[in-house]
Image: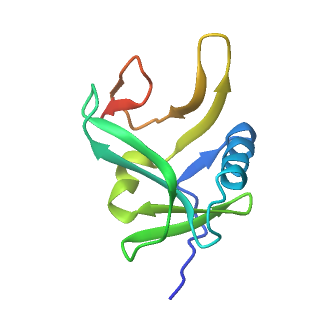
Amino acid sequence: MQTTTAIQPISLTNGAVSQLKRIMESEKIPGEHGLRVGVKGGGCSGFSYVLGFDAKTENDDEFEIDGMKVYMQKSHAIYLLGMEIDWVEGLNNRGFSFNNPNAASTCGCGTSFSA
């Protein structure tokens, strides 16, 4: 059973989408895999972001951004609703950036937060 939700709990900037599609192509990610976005316990501030490619599980919501399947565990939505993922490429920083309105505080590394 395949369900795709129309409401996108997160957003990806054009830069993030371009970089993710480049990674999918260069790493030869299987077509049935999608972008997994989530959280896990740990990190400097209590939670760390999960970002990678994975197969859909029964606990996932699925949505689509710019033709890319995105999977998120239903229970993670309370921590990620409204978050924007961007790709940053500067002199001091290069990588994915997480702008999460649900984060009470974030760590200097930018990949850890508290809710």
* View extreme (bottom): residue: 1
Please tell me which residue lies in front, 100 or 25: 25
Task: State the image quarter where residue 25 is shown.
Answer: bottom right
Q: Is residue 54 above or below residue 93?
A: below
Q: Is residue 34 above or below residue 115?
A: below
User: Which residue is pictured at 62% across the width and 61% down the height?
Assistant: 29
* View extreme (top): residue: 91
**Image quarter in which the C terminus is found:** top left
Q: How many marks?
A: 0
Residue 32: give x, y in percent of width and height.
Answer: 59, 73
* View extreme (front): residue: 27
User: Which residue is pictured at 62% across the width and 67% down the height?
Assistant: 30
**Seen in the image, is 100 located left or right of residue 75?**
right
**Seen in the image, is 47 located left or right of residue 109?**
left
**Seen in the image, is 44 located left or right of residue 79?**
left
Residue 72: give x, y in percent of width and height.
Answer: 45, 60
Q: Which of the colour schemes (rainbow, by chain, secondary structure, one colour) is used?
A: rainbow
Residue 24: give x, y in percent of width and height.
Answer: 67, 54
User: Which residue is pictured at 42% across the width and 21% down the height?
Assistant: 109
Please tell me which residue lies in front, 57 or 72: 57
Q: Is residue 100 above or below residue 64?
A: above
Residue 13: give x, y in percent of width and height.
Answer: 69, 40
Task: State the image quarter where residue 91 is shown.
Answer: top right
Please tell me which residue lies in front, 82 or 75: 75
